[in-house]
């Protein structure tokens, strides 16, 4: 089956004319009805079961494929004569007829989908990079804390206890965590750039 389970066509789309031609053909409707029953079949099986000439079946299968009402299955067979036998099935798509403007908007937004996917991937990469950087910074902070503890070891306990506690607590309580993480700025900037680009180039998309 195809990835999309619907087909969006406008009133001015040439594809709609092909669909109308197919649905007005009694032979095509018989083939559709037969495929609904058997799920899949090759041209020879359709010809035998429906009592149609092979050239008639081939012609109607071609029209059904062009209108995307049926599709070729990925699996196929080889005949005893070494000929490739193609299997056909219904495409299981819902046909949505929409005004031209709606179709154009949908197509333009669909063309931007790869850009949004790339933005999401890069944002995640920045997020991971920032997490690793912050973790390394915190490890260095803990190392500094251990060094501070060692530097106070063996010193006279006059005012050093207080100084040591203040120093160590200050270091250990410091955790590098920016108020506005880098990935949020990256995502906001990317989305803003996409929005501006879309507005300026809407007619060209």
Image: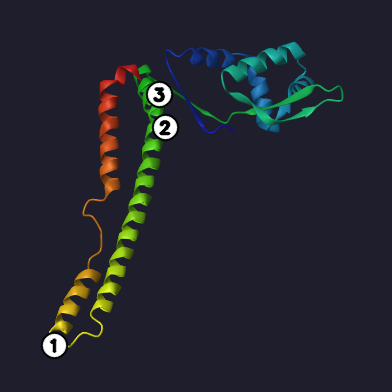
Distance (Cα) linking label 2 and label 3: 13 Å
Q: Is residue 27 visible?
A: no
Is residue 154 or residue 183 the one in the foreground? 154
Labels 2 and 1: the sequence-earlier one: 2
Residue 53 relative to residue 138: left or right: right
Q: Is residue 15 visible?
A: yes
Residue annotated with mark 2: 114
Residue annotated with mark 1: 158
Identify the residue at image location x=80%, y=27%: 78
Examine the rendered structure and indicate whether residue 152 appears above or below residue 70: below
Q: Position of residue 4 (x, y in %)?
A: 51, 32
- The answer to whether the residues at label 2 and label 3 have Cβ atoms under 8 Å apart is no
Q: How would you rate the neighbour count of disc 1 (Cα within 10 Å): few for under 14, some for 14-19, many for 20 or more?
A: few
Examine the rendered structure and indicate whether residue 26 appears above or below residue 85: above
Q: Position of residue 83 (x, y in %)?
A: 80, 21
Is residue 109 or residue 166 the one in the foreground? 166
Identify the residue at image location x=25%, y=28%: 196
Labels 1 and 3: the sequence-earlier one: 3
Q: Position of residue 136 (x, y in %)?
A: 34, 59
Labels 2 and 3: the sequence-earlier one: 3
Q: Foreground mark, 2 or 3?
A: 2
Q: Foreground mark, 1 or 3?
A: 1
Q: How would you rate the neighbour count of disc 2 (Cα within 10 Å): few for under 14, some for 14-19, many for 20 or more?
A: few
Numbered label attached to residue 107: 3
> In this view, which residue lies farthest toward the bottom?
157
Distance (Cα) linking label 2 and label 1: 67 Å
> In this view, which residue lies farthest toward the left?
159
């Amino acid at each position: 089956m195809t990835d999309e389970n619907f087909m969006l066509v406008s009133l001015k789309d040439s594809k709609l004319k092909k669909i109308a031609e197919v649905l007005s053909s009694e032979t095509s409707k018989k083939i559709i009805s037969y495929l609904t029953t058997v799920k899949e079949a090759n041209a020879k099986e359709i010809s035998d079961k429906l009592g149609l000439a092979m050239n008639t079946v081939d012609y109607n299968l071609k029209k059904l494929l062009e209108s995307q009402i049926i599709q070729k299955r990925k699996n196929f067979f080889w005949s005893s004569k070494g000929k490739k036998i193609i299997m056909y099935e219904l495409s299981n798509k819902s046909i949505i007829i929409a005004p031209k403007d709606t179709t154009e908007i949908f197509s333009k937004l669909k063309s931007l989908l790869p850009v949004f996917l790339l933005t999401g991937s890069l944002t995640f990469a920045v997020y991971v990079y920032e997490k690793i950087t912050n973790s390394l910074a915190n490890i260095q902070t803990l190392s500094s804390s251990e060094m501070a503890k060692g530097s106070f070891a063996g010193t006279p306990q006059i005012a050093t206890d207080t100084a040591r506690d203040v120093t160590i607590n200050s270091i250990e309580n410091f955790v590098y965590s920016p108020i506005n993480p880098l990935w949020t700025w990256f995502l906001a900037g990317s989305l803003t750039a996409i929005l501006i680009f879309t507005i300026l180039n809407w007619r060209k998309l």
